[in-house]
Each structure stands twice: as structure tokens, then as C-alpha cells.
């Protein structure tokens, strides 16, 4: 049986990317990462890719995304994994790959779409904060959510402390969602996520 083929998009440090690599090496994930795509030539995640001898691809314009689409089709890529990719994907690119693109977002969606989620949650005196894995649609952070993990916000939590807590959650839930998609337990149908062909009315809560 062939390994499920994937590519990873990243813009920064690549800690989620490294976590995925570690889960492949441990045998938890049976996928192959063909390449890493980035819009930032200084992203440390590219160094992680080079260390693992994984091909890197730079994107700067919409035409570059067309080249990535051609790469996806030519190489029969099954899953597109966004791991800290800080640029909004062109709608045309997303529409060509609906059901294949996963993203990890640092909030309990639909709350706090976009940036600065930790600061916003603290400012609003939220009791809980967390992370969500969702399918990507053309509307920002609006695709069907698969799984969420949450933590209680303490009065002493700063933005940095909360960010560290959320990173730990991300590293737990993202491999699970990737595994489910790679093993065809989940799929996207329109604006819904199906798990074992049953519509998820609410995201799976990771405990």
C-alpha cells in the first residue's frame, strides 16, 4: 500500500512541521512529505526541511501557486498541510483542492479568526482558549472544524505563556486530524466535516 503523499506550507519556525516529522518517524503517521512550500525565504522551517532532505518550494505570486497546483496534480498529492502559513491562500488555489487542505488555528473557532488570538482572548477575559484543526475553504478560518483542544486561561497567563500552552495542544491534535484524513476516517462535504460518514455537528473535543 502506497504512503499517503503530502506537502506542508509554512512561514516561520516550523514547530508543527517538526512535530509532524516526529510523528512520521514514530510510526504514528503513515504519510510522506514530498515538499515544503514557503513565502518566507528566512523561515527556520526551511532549514528543518533541508535537514530532512525534503524539497523546498518558494511562492511569491499567484502564478507560483499555479505551479504548486501543477506539482500537486503531477505528484498525486493527497493532503496539503498548513503549518503556520501566514499568507492567505488565493481562492482559486483553495477551490482546486477543497477537501485536501488542513489548517491548525490558535483559537476555539469560530472565535478569534485571523491574527493575535492569544492577546484577544486575554483582553476579552475569556475563561478558555485553545486550538482548532479545520478544512480550508476560501473564507478565512471558516472551514468545517474537525477537532479542538482547550485550556483554561489563568489570571497570571501572559500572551507568551498562553501561546506556549496552545502550542502543546496543537502538537497533540494536528497529528490526529492528519491521521484521520490520511486513513479516510474524515472527509469534507460542502461546509460539513464527516467522520465515518456521519456529519460532525460539533468538533471533536480532545481531552
Image: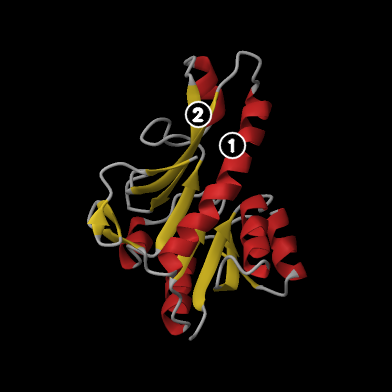
Q: Which colour scheme is used?
A: secondary structure
Residue nearest the observer in this picture, 67 or 81:
81
Point out residue 177 in the picture as x, y percentages from the top left corner: 46, 56
Residue nearest the observer in this picture, 207 or 40:
207
Q: Is residue 107 left or right of residue 92?
A: right
Above/below status of 42 relative to 111: below
Question: In the current view of this chain or complex, which residue is farthest to the front?
Answer: 207
Query: Is residue 41 visible in the rendered structure shown here?
Result: no
What crowding class fits label 2: few (fewer than 14 Cα within 10 Å), some (14-19), or many (20 or more)? many
Q: Which of marks 1 and 2 is nearer the N terminus?
A: 2
Above/below status of 90 relative to 80: above
- What element does badge 1 sit on? helix
Question: In the current view of this chain or complex, which residue is farthest to the bottom?
Answer: 1
Mark 1 touching mark 2, by CB under 8 A? Answer: yes
Point out residue 27 in the picture as x, y percentages from the top left corner: 62, 69
Query: Is residue 147 visible in the rendered structure shown here?
Result: yes
What crowding class fits label 1: few (fewer than 14 Cα within 10 Å), some (14-19), or many (20 or more)? many
What is the quadrant of residue 141 in the picture? Answer: top left
Q: Residue at the location (32% across, 46% down)?
A: 139
Q: Residue at the location (48% across, 86% down)?
A: 1
Q: Mark 2 points at which residue?
A: 129
Q: Mark 1 points at which residue?
A: 166
Q: Residue at the location (33% across, 53% down)?
A: 137
- What element does badge 2 sit on? strand
Point out residue 33 in the picture as x, y percentages from the top left corner: 58, 72
Residue nearest the observer in this picture, 108 or 55:
108
Q: How far apart are marks 1 and 2 (CA)?
A: 8 Å
Q: In this view, does 68 lie to the left or right of 144?
A: right
Residue nearest the observer in this picture, 78 or 200:
200
Point out residue 106 in the picture as x, y percentages from the top left corner: 51, 38
Above/below status of 193 relative to 109: below
How many numbered discs sit on the rendered protein? 2
Amino acid at each position: 500500500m502506497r504512503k499517503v503523499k503530502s506537502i506542508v506550507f509554512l512561514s516561520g519556525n516550523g514547530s508543527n512541521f517538526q512535530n509532524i516529522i516526529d510523528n512520521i518517524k514514530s510510526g504514528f503517521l503513515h504519510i510522506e512529505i514530498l515538499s515544503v512550500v514557503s513565502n518566507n525565504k528566512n523561515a527556520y522551517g526551511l532549514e528543518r526541511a533541508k535537514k530532512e532532505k525534503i524539497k523546498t518550494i518558494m511562492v511569491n505570486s499567484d502564478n507560483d501557486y499555479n505551479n504548486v497546483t501543477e506539482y500537486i496534480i503531477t505528484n498525486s498529492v493527497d493532503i496539503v498541510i498548513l503549518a503556520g502559513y501566514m499568507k492567505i491562500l488565493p481562492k482559486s488555489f483553495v477551490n482546486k483542492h477543497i477537501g485536501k487542505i488542513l489548517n491548525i488555528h490558535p483559537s476555539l473557532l469560530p472565535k478569534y479568526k485571523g491574527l493575535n488570538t492569544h492577546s484577544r482572548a486575554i483582553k476579552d477575559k475569556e475563561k478558555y482558549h485553545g486550538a482548532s484543526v479545520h478544512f480550508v475553504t476560501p473564507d478565512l478560518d471558516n472551514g468545517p472544524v474537525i477537532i479542538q483542544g482547550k485550556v483554561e486561561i489563568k489570571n497570571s497567563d501572559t500572551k507568551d505563556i498562553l501561546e506556549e500552552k496552545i502550542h502543546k495542544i496543537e502538537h497533540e491534535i494536528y497529528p490526529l486530524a492528519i491521521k484521520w484524513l490520511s486513513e479516510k476516517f474524515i472527509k469534507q462535504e460542502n461546509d460539513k466535516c464527516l467522520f465515518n460518514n456521519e456529519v460532525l455537528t460539533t468538533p471533536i473535543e480532545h481531552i
